[in-house]
């Protein structure tokens, strides 16, 4: 690495200020995993050692029931991040205020280290499609996305992180790169970024570009969290496509990209993200500990370099 | 543009393909097909999670084919996906291939109601001793008001939907083949602790509990029928932990 400023502490301090976290948290030093209802009982029985849990906001917006009951119990023992999957930041319509307010209430209650959402849309004309759909990279979309992020940040009264998408096609009307779009979005709204390394692998594979070039150009100063997940290969006979399925272990290519990312970004809070084909929790903990080993190695080598 | 993209996702229409960057029409189709597939699979999975007994009754293949038809007509209105499927039972009632199971729509309605009720807020329910004390301290027990969680529901079904549902639970005490599906049933759906539960009750109990839910005092809630056993019915409500307050009416 040719440029490795010693900014690890700096970026943590910066995040602490924006996120309103007053004490150092395991979130910063130890990798976390997705919280799924299948794991509620084993977590409360065994209290596994883990940096934090991440929840999808939309699964915890009810007034009662088991999801909220166990969330409250587990929250007493662990740091949390909240990941929105339904605000439709990239949508053409105004944000759903009722939904936004429900999410804000959850965030106020859970007081997570981070709230994140996606550079994507999922709702149009009051219909929710339960998928993260792509946006065109042009000025009209940029203006709209920035307005929505401004509204989100002012409602939540905090800086949010926006995640780079996994995409299966590009728009002919896009007049700038995804990186340029994300850089402008970050500059205009002051939002942070959630760098999903698996999405980089998936999108670059599908767009036939080099994921290392993408990562080297990514605005790393704004990255507040990293996601790692598994993907699958689409079986169609026309063109090979990688699918961001979150139902497999993190693959070798993505671990390599992750190590490269950390050398570039510096140590960074990391999540092992799993949504489907859920294994015993021990397998996710093993992946989280593997991420911690890579982080320790990177911290050491960056320290050697700066010393 | 999202209006056109959304339309393309729910049809095989290629009008949107000019917006997609790719070398050929078939490549554009392969790319957009990933989104088409993601949406249908995720919504079919969501319906399977919300309606597990409905799926068990018709089998996975039939269920997913039926769900696909439903998704084409009715997409979710809310990003809270556990609320999806409120019109699924009506759809099933009119779904021709499911006509041989006339109770299927009602069963789907029951599953959806139980999940929504589970996600309602919790109430603290009274222990046996607290209820006994309230009765002892009352100057006239007939004037007591017995409150259940206000989200509780009593309904009458033209089929044995409650028994069919219970036969599919892990603690089932009877088998599906022993159920006469054309028997009508009175059901109580109510929440104690964090889960909503289903209770099959008698007609008299249905009248009694409905009266309690309307806030009638105990003396007026009792149905006018010699077969009604007040002691046994109260014992059930106490066992099921469904009483949240026992009080005398405020004057």
Image (cartoon, rainbow, N blue to C red):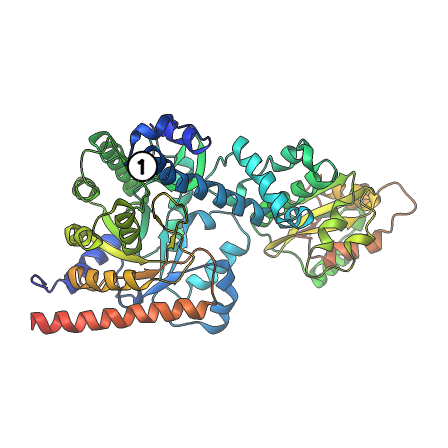
Answer above or below: position of A162 versus A248: above
Q: Quadrant of residue A255?
A: bottom left
Q: Residues within 10 Å of mark 1 (few under 14, many from 20)?
A: many
Dividing the image into 4 quarters, which one contains the N terminus of chain B? top left
- Position of residue A25 measured from the top left corner of the image (x, y, whole percent): 29, 65
Left or right side of B242 for A251? left
- Position of residue A295 measured from the top left corner of the image (x, y, whole percent): 24, 69
- Position of residue B139 measured from the top left corner of the image (x, y, whole percent): 78, 52
Q: Quadrant of residue B173?
A: bottom right
Q: Secondary structure at mark 1?
A: loop
Asked if residue B81 can be seen in this view, the reply is: yes
Q: Which residue appears at 66% of the width and 40% of the height?
A: B109
- Position of residue A56 measured from the top left corner of the image (x, y, whole percent): 41, 51
Q: Which residue is mark 1?
A: A90
Asked if residue B140 can be seen in this view, the reply is: no
Looking at the image, which is closer to me, B248 or B204? B204
Q: Quadrant of residue A256?
A: bottom left
Chain of the residue under label 1: A
Looking at the image, which is closer to me, B6 or A269? B6
Dividing the image into 4 quarters, which one contains the C terminus of chain B? top right
């Amino acid at each position: 690495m040719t440029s490795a400023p010693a900014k690890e502490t700096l970026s943590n301090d910066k995040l602490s200020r924006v996120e309103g976290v007053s004490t150092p948290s395991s979130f910063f030093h130890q990798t976390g995993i997705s919280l799924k209802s299948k794991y509620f009982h084993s977590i409360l029985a065994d209290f596994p050692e883990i940096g934090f849990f991440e929840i999808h906001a939309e699964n915890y917006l009810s007034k009662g029931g088991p999801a909220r009951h166990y969330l409250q119990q587990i929250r007493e023992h662990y740091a949390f991040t909240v990941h929105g999957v339904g605000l439709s930041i990239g949508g053409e319509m105004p944000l759903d205020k009722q939904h936004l307010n429900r999410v804000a209430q959850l965030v106020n209650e859970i007081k997570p280290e981070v709230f994140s959402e996606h550079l994507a849309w999922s709702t149009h004309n009051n219909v929710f499609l339960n998928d993260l759909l792509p946006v065109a990279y042009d000025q009209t979309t940029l203006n709209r996305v920035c307005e929505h992020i401004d509204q989100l940040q002012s409602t939540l009264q905090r800086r949010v992180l926006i995640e780079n998408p996994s995409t299966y096609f590009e728009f002919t009307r896009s007049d700038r790169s995804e990186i340029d779009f994300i850089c402008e979005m970050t500059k205009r709204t002051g939002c942070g970024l959630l760098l999903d390394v698996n999405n980089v692998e998936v999108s670059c594979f599908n767009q036939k570009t080099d994921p290392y070039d993408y990562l080297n150009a990514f605005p790393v100063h704004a990255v507040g969290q990293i996601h790692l997940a598994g993907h699958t290969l689409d079986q169609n006979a026309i063109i090979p496509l990688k699918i961001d399925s979150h139902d497999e272990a993190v693959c070798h290519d993505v671990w390599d990209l992750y190590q490269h990312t950390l050398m570039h970004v510096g140590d960074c809070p990391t999540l092992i993200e799993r949504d489907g084909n859920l294994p015993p929790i021990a397998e996710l903990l093993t992946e989280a500990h593997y991420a911690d080993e890579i982080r320790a190695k990177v911290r050491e080598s960056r320290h050697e370099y700066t010393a | 543009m999202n209006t056109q993209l959304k339309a393309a996702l729910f049809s095989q229409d290629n009008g949107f393909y000019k917006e997609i960057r790719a070398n050929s029409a078939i490549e554009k189709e392969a790319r957009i097909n990933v989104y088409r597939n993601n949406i249908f699979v995720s919504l079919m999975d969501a319906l399977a999670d919300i309606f597990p007994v409905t799926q068990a009754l018709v089998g996975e293949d039939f269920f997913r084919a039926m769900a696909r038809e439903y998704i084409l007509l009715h997409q979710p209105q809310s990003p809270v996906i556990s609320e999806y499927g409120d019109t699924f039972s009506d759809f099933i009632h009119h779904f021709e291939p499911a006509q041989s199971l006339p109770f299927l729509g009602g069963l789907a309605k029951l599953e959806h109601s139980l999940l929504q009720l589970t996600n309602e807020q919790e109430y603290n329910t009274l222990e046996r001793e607290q209820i006994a004390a309230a009765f002892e301290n009352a100057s006239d027990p007939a004037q007591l008001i017995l409150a259940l969680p206000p989200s509780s529901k009593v309904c009458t079904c033209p089929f044995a939907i409650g028994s069919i549902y219970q036969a599919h639970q892990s603690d089932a005490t009877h088998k599906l083949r022993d159920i006469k599906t054309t028997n009508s049933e009175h059901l109580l759906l109510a929440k104690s602790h964090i889960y909503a539960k289903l209770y099959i009750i008698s007609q008299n109990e249905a009248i009694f509990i409905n009266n309690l839910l309307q806030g009638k005092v105990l003396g007026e809630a009792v149905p006018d029928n010699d077969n009604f056993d007040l002691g046994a019915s109260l014992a059930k409500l106490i066992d099921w932990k469904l009483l949240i307050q026992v009080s005398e009416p405020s004057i």
